[in-house]
């Protein structure tokens, strides 16, 4: 799978990180997750590197509370299906490479993504 940077162009944090990392210049495909849905295969590839669907899941999504998910005990299968069904549940941005996945806006994740793009 080629390097792919999954982003939401309307998200200010994604915009800032994309401008900082410039994934397209490093040869990564840049994907708008709202315009082109994340596939089950892509989510499974992310999981293969992260070891957990929950690690890829964003609890900050507005739908997390509105759907009552905060009150449920979600399983790994639930996290997987929610990410596939609704793009807002993917912790973003995400860089997926052959050797790893880097999700979210935490400083460590962004620095690891930078290293993966440069390496």
Image (spheres, rainbow, N blue to C red):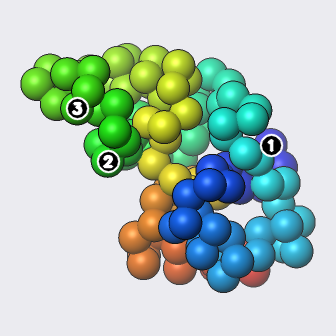
Which image quarter holds the N terminus? top right
Indicate the position of residue 67 as horizontal and vertical percent values. 27, 21
The residue under the point 76% across, 75% down is: 22
Instruction: Give the Cα separation between the discs numbered 3 and 1.
Output: 34 Å
| Sequence-earlier tag: 2 or 1 | 1
Q: Secondary structure at mark 3?
A: helix
Q: Is residue 49 visible?
A: yes
Indicate the position of residue 94 as horizontal and vertical percent values. 59, 54
Instruction: Give the Cα separation between the discs numbered 2 and 1.
Output: 28 Å
**Front residue of this view, candidates 88 and 48:** 88
The residue under the point 62% across, 55% down is: 10
Instruction: Give the Cα separation between the discs numbered 2 and 3.
Output: 9 Å
The residue under the point 44% across, 36% down is: 89
Mark nearest the camera among 3 and 1 is 3
Badge 3 crowding class, 10 Å Cα cut-off, few under 14, some 14 to 19, many 20 or more, is few
| Sequence-earlier tag: 3 or 1 | 1
| Sequence-earlier tag: 2 or 3 | 2
| Residue 18 numbered mark, or none | none
| Residue 65 numbered mark, or none | 3
Q: Secondary structure at mark 1?
A: loop
Q: Is residue 91 above or below residue 20?
A: above
Indicate the position of residue 42 as horizontal and vertical percent values. 66, 33
The residue under the point 48% across, 37% down is: 88
Q: Place residue 69 in its image quadrant.
A: top left
Q: Is residue 21 above or below residue 24?
A: below
- Residue linked to disc 1: 1
Badge 1 crowding class, 10 Å Cα cut-off, few under 14, some 14 to 19, many 20 or more, is few
Q: Is residue 27 left or right of residue 6?
A: right
């Amino acid at each position: 799978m080629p390097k792919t940077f999954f982003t939401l162009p309307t998200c200010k944090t994604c915009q800032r990180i994309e401008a900082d990392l410039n994934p397209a210049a490093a040869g990564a495909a840049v994907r708008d997750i709202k315009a082109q849905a994340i596939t089950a295969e892509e989510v499974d590839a992310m999981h293969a590197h992260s070891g957990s669907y929950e690690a890829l899941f964003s609890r900050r999504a507005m739908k997390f509370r509105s759907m009552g998910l905060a009150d449920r005990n979600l399983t790994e299968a639930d996290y997987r299906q929610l990410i596939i069904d609704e793009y807002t549940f993917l912790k973003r941005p995400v860089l997926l490479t052959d050797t790893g996945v880097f999700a979210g806006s935490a400083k460590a994740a962004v620095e690891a993504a930078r290293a993966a793009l440069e390496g």
